[in-house]
Amino acid sequence: MRGPVVVVGDTLLDRDVEGVVNRLCPDSPVPVLDETSAVDRPGGAGLAAVFAAAQGADVVLVTALADDAGGARLSALLAAAGVQVYPLSLSGSTPEKIRLRARGRVLLRHDRGGASGEPGQPSDEVLRVLARASAVLVSDYGRGVARQPALRAALAATRAPVVWDPHPRGPAAVPGVHLATPNESEVRELVPALPGASRLATASRGAQGLRRRWRAGAVAVTLGGDGALLCHAGSTPLVVPTPGSAEGDTCGAGDRFAAAASLALAQGALVSEAVQAAVAEASAYVAGGGVATALPPEQPFPHVLRAGSNRRPASGHAVAGPGGGERVGVAAVATLLAEVRGAGGTVVATGGCFDLLHAGHLATLQAARQLGDCLIVCVNSDTSVAGLKGPDRPVMAEGDRARLLAALSCVDAVLVFDEPTPEAVLSWLRPDVWVKGGDYATGGPDAVGLPEAEVLRRWGGNTVVVPYLDGRSTSDLIARSAGGPAADAGGRPQQPVGVAAPVSTTRERTR
């Protein structure tokens, strides 16, 4: 494949709540579900992207993320699955679909998130990644991303094969798509059936009608456990049966079908070959247990990024800022983002371990705050620090580090994350400016590129470096407290306390 597989569409937060039912509610004749476990996962276009990434493909997801806990959770889940998120802004709330289950059966589905929000404009980087894609899957869930004018223009212009998985509430496919993949019920909504027509006749008539209306190369109507019906330029449709029994949980089967077809087209398959591969993949998926077994076991994702969470420091006390209110956690950050962006302001973010807060940290934070209208600090959790620095670190627990940072007048909010890098957090925050202290931009012989710069380009953000005070190092402070000599990165003795140190751009001292 010459480029990534790009998935474009609406991403939802899906949650399966498993439990047992042993009694009825005393004030209403309905069952009471005692929750035993709950699993979060990306839904909609996000699930299709996860399926494609699980097959080893280089996958980019262009989707809209809201400034709320659900958006933060989705960003973490997608990053953990190996999906590169190119986020658009999203007004309103993250759509959530919660399935209440007992003994493998769905008792009730609870949808929340309200009306569809308006997705923001794609960045130039989004348009470039669409232009170099090996295949594009539009996973439309009727919430607006597939309707975005600039995205539609880019989809119509790409030379990559485009698979369009439509939704009755969504727009028409852009002209010229290689393959559209509606299911039976969607076809009946989009093309009314003739009275008394057979199932195959209805599917065939609907597929041909959509193919002509959308000027699509082919339309494959998925028929559940009976496979798919493919209509292309010829007058005779191709029926692709399932290779065996496909009974089970069908949640996500359409996404698995569309993702498999897209991957096959990216590898040069004919449309008929892609549909056959997709039928086989979707059938095996359902027979194997569906989404509950197809996705890898849930990893220990960041506590603060769980939907509905607003983590407090380890002490259990709220961290209040000068204006009152908590300043640590997803809810606090989401409120700040809404206020600053609503006023047309600039969001600045920085990150690090901040283990033993010192003057070097303070200089960097103060310089960063001057670059915009708010400063959000992304702090590595205890788990993340230990993975980066070794089992003896951090010296201070994440709650204490977050509390100290939030108490600084130059810091507006703090977010703790578990991953080794802040990519997932950044995909949700979408800061206008990301700030680091170091020699990344000095042009010296040892200078290297800022690793987060590529991530920031996905939504048109900028990365900058600010200098910090020489001779301030967390490692030196730890060594000095243990009775050892303190030295700078070049092995020179540190200057005595009180002696002014020159400004340095040596990377990593503020960590």
Image (cartoon, rainbow, N blue to C red):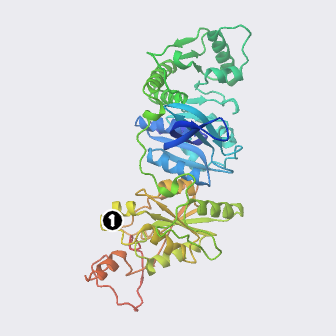
- In-front residue for pair 278/309: 309
Q: Is residue 76 visible?
A: yes
Q: Is residue 137 above or below residue 459?
A: above
Task: Tell me the element at label 1.
Answer: helix
Crowding at dot 1, Cα within 10 Å, few <14 / some 14-19 / many 20+, comes out as few
Task: Give the residue furthest to the front.
Answer: 26
- In-front residue for pair 163/1: 163
Tell me the quarter of the image containing the C terminus: bottom left
Task: Give the residue furthest to the left.
Answer: 484
User: How far from the left and from the top, in percent, is residue 273?
Assistant: 47, 19
- In-front residue for pair 434/396: 396
Task: Give the residue furthest to the bottom.
Answer: 498
User: How far from the left and from the top, in percent, is residue 341?
Assistant: 67, 61
Q: Is residue 41 visible?
A: no
Tell me the quarter of the image containing the N terminus: top left
Residue 80 horizontal side relative to residue 192, left or right:
left
**Quadrant of the image occupied by residue 420:** bottom left
Residue at 61 percent of width and 59 percent of height: 334
Q: Is residue 396 above or below residue 421?
A: below
Q: Is residue 249 above or below residue 495?
A: above
Residue at 48 percent of width and 33 percent of height: 291
How many labels were placed on the picture? Answer: 1
Q: Disc 1 designates what residue?
A: 389
Residue 44 horizontal side relative to residue 420, left or right:
right
* Residue type beneath disc 1: Lys
User: How far from the left and from the top, in percent, is residue 22?
Assistant: 53, 36
**Quadrant of the image occupied by residue 157:** top right
User: How far from the left and from the top, in percent, is residue 377?
Assistant: 52, 67
